[in-house]
Image (cartoon, rainbow, N blue to C red):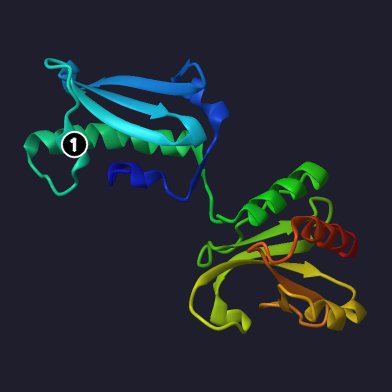
Amino acid sequence: MTGIEEQFNGKKLLVKKLIPFGFTKEGSNYALVREILGGQFRLEIRVGRGKKVSVKVFDNDSGEEYLLFSVLSVQGALVGRIRKEVFAITDKFISECFETQIFKRKSANDLIGYAEQKYGDKPEYLWERFPQFAAIRKHENKKWYCLLGTVEKSKVGLKGDEIIEVANFKIVPKELPGLLKKPGYLPAYHMNKKSWVTVLLDGTVPLTEIKKLLDKSYTLA
């Protein structure tokens, strides 16, 4: 992956947006071709297997790829003009065809999908200063039943500074002691420690169990 393509890191591609944006379907892949610098060069953005995005620029006179475009250490008037036009297009592409994906773990994203599919509730990023936290609320009464976040291990009582993904769920207080004896369960982070519990989203707790926690939390909210 080149430095140019790193702008797509941490973002979720919305495939259904590609055709409206101007992409054409080529088998199982998608392609967007745009002339830049008055037709001297050609930008090709392709989406392949696994939603991998590639961005390449070609010299229309030679038909060859203009490799200097992707080497970010290379500067100059021509490459600068090319990048300016390309980034104008890729910025619009990101704005219209991607959503920010704070959470990388499969458990976290499967949980988000489960809440949306079953209850019609999407994560809400309510705190501008803390974009790494998202609340899932009942759309009927706006009460929280899940709080997802990325935190340092040390913040939840674990050793190390590694960033981990966690979820908080509302529980029946009498069930808390039993839950805290199980792997992957921790005292609630930034929530009432009597009626909430924090769960690691690293695979320690099976997804089926996490979904049951979400369901019970929903009924308690």
Residue lying at 57% horizontally and 27% vertically, measured from the top left: 16
Instruction: From the top left corner, tell me how far across and down residue 164 is, in percent.
Output: 56, 68
Q: Nearer the viewer, residue 213 or 181?
A: 181
Residue 8 found in image quarter: top left
In the rendered image, which quarter contains the C terminus? bottom right
Residue lying at 12% horizontally and 17% vertically, measured from the top left: 62
Compared across the picture, whether 73 is left or right of 18 comes to left
Q: Nearer the viewer, residue 164 or 171?
A: 164
Instruction: From the top left corner, tell me how far across and down residue 129 is, in percent.
Output: 50, 67
The residue to which callout 1 is attached is 69
In the rendered image, which quarter contains the N terminus? top left
Query: Taking 81 as reference, is 181 above or below it?
Result: below
Question: Badge 1: how crowded within 10 Å, few (<14), some, or many (20+)?
Answer: many
Q: What's the amino acid at mark 1? A: Phe
Instruction: From the top left corner, tell me how far across and down residue 143 is, in percent.
Output: 79, 61
Compared across the picture, whether 102 is left or right of 91 comes to right
Residue lying at 59% horizontally and 82% vertically, measured from the top left: 158
